[in-house]
Image (cartoon, rainbow, N blue to C red):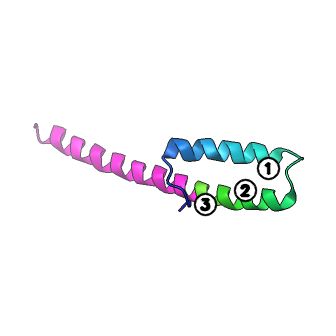
């Protein structure tokens, strides 16, 4: 989990910033490494949020299909 609390959108935005800074040749190696570590944490966080949303959608879809199949 990232040290700072992020929403999914904020985390994705921060990942974009990190990518730009790492790609900048003027960014020192040590800073690039720290940014990379932060980026990995954010990637794991984002993947978890997306997976959680997928699972919720699956449950909602099954619930809706059951309602429609039962004529409710």
Indicate yes or no whether the magenta region holds residue 54. Answer: yes
Q: Main secondary structure of the magenta part?
A: helix
- Find the distance from the CA under tag 2 to the CA under tag 3: 10 Å
Q: Is residue 33 above or below residue 15?
A: below
Q: Residue furthest right?
A: 25
Mark 2 lies on a secondary structure that is: helix
Q: Reading the chain from its start, which is encountered first: label 3 or label 1?
A: 1
The answer to which of 13 and 46 lies nearer the viewer is 13
- Find the distance from the CA under tag 2 to the CA under tag 1: 7 Å
| Residue for badge 1 | 22
| Residue for badge 2 | 35
Residue numbers of the magenta segment: 44-72
Graded by Cα atoms within 10 Å as few (under 14), some (14 to 19) or many (20 or more), the crowding at tag 2 reads some
Q: Reading the chain from its start, which is encountered first: label 2 or label 3?
A: 2
Residue 41 position within the rendered picture, expressed as x and y whole percent measured from the top left = 61, 60
Tell me if 31 is positioned left or right of 67 in this view. Answer: right
Say whether marks 2 and 1 touch (CB < 8 Å).
yes
| Residue for badge 3 | 41
Mark 1 lies on a secondary structure that is: helix
């Amino acid at each position: 989990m990232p040290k700072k609390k992020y929403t999914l959108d904020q985390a994705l935005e921060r990942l974009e910033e990190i990518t730009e800074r790492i790609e900048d040749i003027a960014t020192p190696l040590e800073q690039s490494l720290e940014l990379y570590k932060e980026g990995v944490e954010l990637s794991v966080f984002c993947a978890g949020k997306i997976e959680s949303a997928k699972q919720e959608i699956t449950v909602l879809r099954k619930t809706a299909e059951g309602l429609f199949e039962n004529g409710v």
